[in-house]
């Protein structure tokens, strides 16, 4: 099997699968169970300075979709509510017992240099491999001037990162909030502050649902609700985009990235790594299915790498980044049209309905020998892919390239581009 061992921001782990800072990493008991299951590393649930945090009892909500009970997940839980001394003692013990696994500690304290300095010194004493600065939490702590309240201000990100680099020898990972207009602003600030790596995405600010009986946002706390942090499979596209933006940015190109957001399979992890992530962090999938999902992740990634001829993770890490571009550089001469395999077609008509009602009226509905038949009208088909995605039969509808290898032509070169016309 391919070698899955990795070194991220100077931190070694036997595989790239880490648990994110969250309820699954809140205590020694959970972390030891995770390591026994095979996880390569964990980020310990966010520590803060005493006095202890007080959490609500109703704190999670889920979005169910098409049979998936947790397609999206939200929480209004705060950072750890366990005493700081207990957490530090357990971290020290776990690292002593599992020296080959990565153990990073997530931190969140008031935006004061002395607070960070005190906390870093205490974490260093545990022997932890690094710290992750939680600049992402969008609820509860942000109202107290921490979490995303820091992460949304690039100057604060740079300032606190610089403080931490001055006051610790440990690698400093900056966890970024997605609740910004442009992810590059806080990412570049972290780089300027000297961060050893960034991790993203933290949760999206959200209201996941409204309880129509109680007329309050879910999760409901005694008749009231609030905004929470949204995660799970539904946020993966947002996370992939933001990881890719950082990976291809000249100012951030060399910063190691930990990918987070909706990862629940080896394929999800491979996609993040293809876009530049060095490790991935998982939370919702572990909460949904348990720690042993990592067994399938390790096995699946290793088998796929063997099949593709990758002996190490660096064989494919970042390989998709050069193919991420801006719209104006896409080849406008590239042409495809849909093809329906009549042997596989079950005559459901979904392709026709979708195209007729919402696209380009490019699929004809006819009858042959008393049976329904659906065929593509080539001259009307624009190759949008809609029919392929609504078809319930795998590979029944495919897309056929028809441009016969014309030279590439993008919008910057196109004769209809007004900027090009003005230049001429």
Image: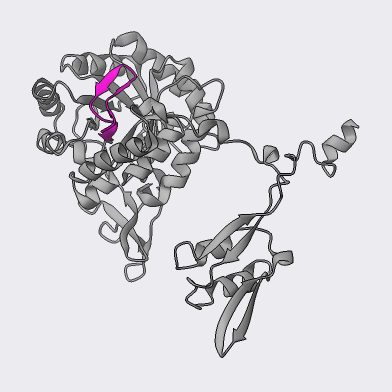
420 or 31: nearer the viewer: 420
Residue 13 covered by magenta stretch: yes
> Which residues are the magenta region?
1-18
Is 222 displayed left or right of 387 in the figure?
left
Is 258 displayed left or right of 60 in the figure?
right
Up-down: is 114 above or below 111?
Answer: above
Where residue 343 appears, as percent x and y from the top left, is: 49, 72
Is 344 displayed left or right of 213 in the figure?
right
The outermost residue toward the right is: 424
Where residue 416 appears, as percent x and y from the top left, is: 84, 45
| Picture quadrant where residue 219 is located | bottom left
Up-down: is 351 above or below 122?
Answer: below
> Could you tell me how many numbered marks the image carries?
0
The outermost residue toward the bottom is: 370
Where residue 235 appears, as percent x and y from the top left, is: 42, 47
How is this picture coloured? Answer: one colour
In the image, what residue occupies the spot 49% across and 27% down? 186
Where residue 365 appears, as percent x and y from the top left, is: 62, 79
Q: Is residue 201 visible?
A: no
In the image, what residue occupies the spot 45% across and 68% down? 392
Name the quarter where the N terminus is drawn.
top left
Q: Is residue 140 visible?
A: yes
17 or 260: nearer the viewer: 17
| Picture quadrant where residue 175 is located | top left
Name the quarter where the C terminus is drawn.
top right
Is 123 displayed left or right of 373 in the figure?
left
Up-down: is 397 above or below 349?
Answer: above
Up-down: is 259 above or below 212?
Answer: above
Residue 103 covered by magenta stretch: no
């Amino acid at each position: 099997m391919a070698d899955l061992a990795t070194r991220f921001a100077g931190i070694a782990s036997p595989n790239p699968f880490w648990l994110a800072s969250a309820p699954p990493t809140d205590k020694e008991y959970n972390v030891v169970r995770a390591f026994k299951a095979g996880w390569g590393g964990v980020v310990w649930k966010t520590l803060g300075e005493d006095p202890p945090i007080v959490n609500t009892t109703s704190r999670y909500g889920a979005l169910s979709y098409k049979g998936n009970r947790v397609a999206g997940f939200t929480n209004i839980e705060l950072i750890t509510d366990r005493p700081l001394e207990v957490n530090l003692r357990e971290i020290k013990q776990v690292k002593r017992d599992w020296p080959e696994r990565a153990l990073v500690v997530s931190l969140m304290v008031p935006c004061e240099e002395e607070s960070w300095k005190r906390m870093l010194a205490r974490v260093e004493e545990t022997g932890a491999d690094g710290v992750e600065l939680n600049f992402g939490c969008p609820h509860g702590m942000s109202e107290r001037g921490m979490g995303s309240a820091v992460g949304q201000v690039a100057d604060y990100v740079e300032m606190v990162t610089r403080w931490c680099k001055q006051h610790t020898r440990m690698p400093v990972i900056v966890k970024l909030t997605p609740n910004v207009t442009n992810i590059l602003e806080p990412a570049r600030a972290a780089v300027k502050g000297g961060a050893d790596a960034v991790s993203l995405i933290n949760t999206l600010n959200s209201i996941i649902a409204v309880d129509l009986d109680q007329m309050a946002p879910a999760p409901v706390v005694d008749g009231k609700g609030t905004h929470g942090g949204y995660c799970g499979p539904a946020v993966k596209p947002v996370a992939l985009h933001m990881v890719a933006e950082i990976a291809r940015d000249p100012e951030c190109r060399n910063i190691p990235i930990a990918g987070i957001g909706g990862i629940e399979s080896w394929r999800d992890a491979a996609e993040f790594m293809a876009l530049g992530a060095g490790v991935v962090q998982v939370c919702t999938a572990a909460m949904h299915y348990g720690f042993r999902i990592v067994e399938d992740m390790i096995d699946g990634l290793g088998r796929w790498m063997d099949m593709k001829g990758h002996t190490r993770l660096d064989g494919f890490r970042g390989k998709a980044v050069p193919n991420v571009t801006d719209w104006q550089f896409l080849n406008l001469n590239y042409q495809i049209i849909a093809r329906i395999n009549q042997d596989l077609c079950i005559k459901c008509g979904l392709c026709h309905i979708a195209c007729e009602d919402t696209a380009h009226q490019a699929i004809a509905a006819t009858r042959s020998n008393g049976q329904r038949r659906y065929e593509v009208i080539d001259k009307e088909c624009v190759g949008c892919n809609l029919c392929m995605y609504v078809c319930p039969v795998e590979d029944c509808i495919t897309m056929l390239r028809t441009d016969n290898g014309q030279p590439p032509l993008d919008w910057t070169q196109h004769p209809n581009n007004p900027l090009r016309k003005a230049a001429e």
